Image (cartoon, rainbow, N blue to C red):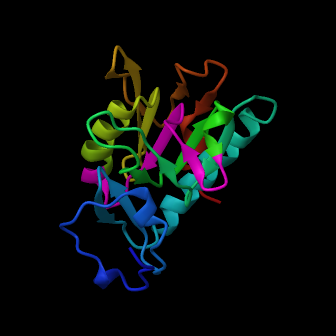
Amino acid sequence: MATVTNFSDLDLTKEYTYSDYLLWQFSERVELIKGFIRQMSPAPNRFHQVVARNITGIFLNAFIKHSCNVYFAPFDVRLPIPSKKKDTTVVQPDICVVCDKSKLDDAGCNGAPELMIEILSPNNSKHDVDTKFKLYEEAGVLEYWIVEPVEKIIFVYTLVNGKYIGLKPQTEGENIQSPLFPDLKIAIIDVFEED
């Protein structure tokens, strides 16, 4: 495949690989889900960015003396999907934590991060709640957070025997504690606090 500079030149019914993805030189943001292109929403709204900044700041402070690394979008994560051939899934989570440094390369993360966070937007909530939930579960992401900024709720799922188990949803006035990283305790109000 040659370099593609116009999104409209791609066949959205065709299956692609990570090698194809690397040849796409257009401005639209896309993810590759089990070989198929999914165009991402335009730039998130301001409050989405506030929430992402708050969580990223909390995580950067929490992991500063930890062997894990915190990354935020845009950051390519190539997920291993057992039901598909290799290198057919590339996502850009809002935030992720990678502890196994052997998964990191110059292109991003090649393997399942330990923790992934998606912040819902009006245009992506079904994708993040349904498609990515199943995808991250299948790929072996150990902990998945879904952040709902409008209602100010955080849903935390942990992988147990290959299936996600949900904790009680956390809302304002409560504190969230990561099952995977027990020292990571966050006041929900700090996640949704505006300047």
Residue 126 in the image: above or below residue 21: above
Figure quadrant of residue 31: bottom left
Q: Residue at x 29, y 44 (%)?
A: 129
Q: Residue 122, relative to residue 185: is it above or below? A: below
Asked whether the viewer can see residue 123, the reply is no
Q: Horizontally, is 38 left or right of 178 in the view?
A: left
- Residue at the outermost front position: 1
Mark yes or no: residue 78 visible: yes
Displayed quadrant of residue 102: top right
Nearest the eye: 14 or 28: 14
Q: Is residue 137 above or below residue 9?
A: above
Furthest toward the right, the residue is 65
What residue lies at 38% left-to-right and 44% top-to-bottom?
Answer: 86
Quadrant (top left, top right, bottom left, bottom right) of the N terminus = bottom left
Is 79 or 170 nearer to us in this picture?
A: 79
Is residue 142 located in the magenta-colored stretch of the structure?
A: no
Q: Position of residue 67 (x, y in %)?
A: 75, 29
Q: Tell me where residue 80 appears, x and y as whole percent.
A: 41, 38
The C terminus - image quarter:
bottom right
Instruction: Please state the horizontal and vertical placement of residue 9, each as a whole percent of the image.
Output: 30, 83
Q: Which residues are magenta?
A: 105-127
Residue 154 position in % (x across, y down):
43, 37
Residue lying at 38% horizontally and 22% vertically, measured from the top left: 167
Q: Image check: 80 left or right of 188?
A: left
